[in-house]
Image (cartoon, helix red, strand yellow):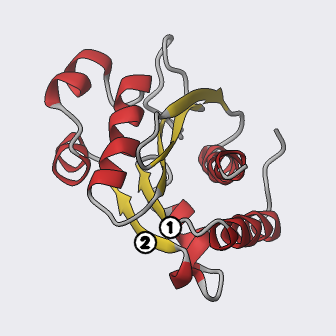
Amino acid sequence: MTVPTDTELDLLARTTGERLLATRHRLATAESCTGGWIAKAVTDVAGSSAWFDCGMAAYSYEAKQALLGVRPQTLETHGAVSRETVVEMVSGALVHSGATLAVAVTGIAGPGGGSDDKPVGTVWIAWKRRGGYAKADVFHFDGDRDAVRRQTVAKALTGLEQHLE
């Protein structure tokens, strides 16, 4: 995947917003490695209050637990960067919001923090509709911290598009 520019992220956010509005969905975001960038991208779109509910940037274990209801045992057993954690994050975003659709991201943007099992660029993204089942995918992005985060925002928005079909 190429690293998306600001213009490309803006276009993705606008397209996502149009689809959310057309399908009468409201979005919530639960973000770790992107630190609120997905929420920023969508709220940069004028009129986003019609389809964006809230964004939660939960970086620490404690914030993931308090804001999103991630279980301590999930974090202890699987770590913050895992399928199990991102699924609990996306579910928690729906429980703690008025949204009908949510996206959650957790990963290792770098430059440090990676391991053999979870190298820098490893990102889990999950999407879920209220009342539905979460879908979670792992990605391995290349580049520096900014590149990993930009690619994560783009994949998160692209995945929302797929969940609106």
Q: Quadrant of the N terminus?
A: top right
Task: Name the foreground residue: 118 vs 11.
Answer: 11
Badge count: 2
Residue under numbered circle 2: 53
| For residue 149, above or below residue 28 | above
- Residue 7 lies in quadrant: bottom right
Task: Name the foreground residue: 104 vs 1.
Answer: 104
Q: Earlier in the sequence, mark 1 or mark 2?
A: 1
Q: Does 49 sit left or right of 57 as displayed?
A: right
Q: Residue sitting at 16 percent across and 22 percent down?
A: 73
Q: Residue sitting at 62 percent across and 48 percent down?
A: 156
Say what amino acid the circle numbered 1 marks.
Arg
Q: Is residue 58 visible?
A: no
SS state under label 2: strand
| For residue 98, above or below residue 107 | below
Give the image location of residue 34, x and y in percent: 50, 53
Give the image location of residue 9, x and y in percent: 74, 64
Label 2: few (<14), some (14–19) or many (≥20) C-alpha neighbours in 10 Å: some
Mark drawn on residue 26: 1
Give the image location of residue 75, x and y in percent: 24, 27
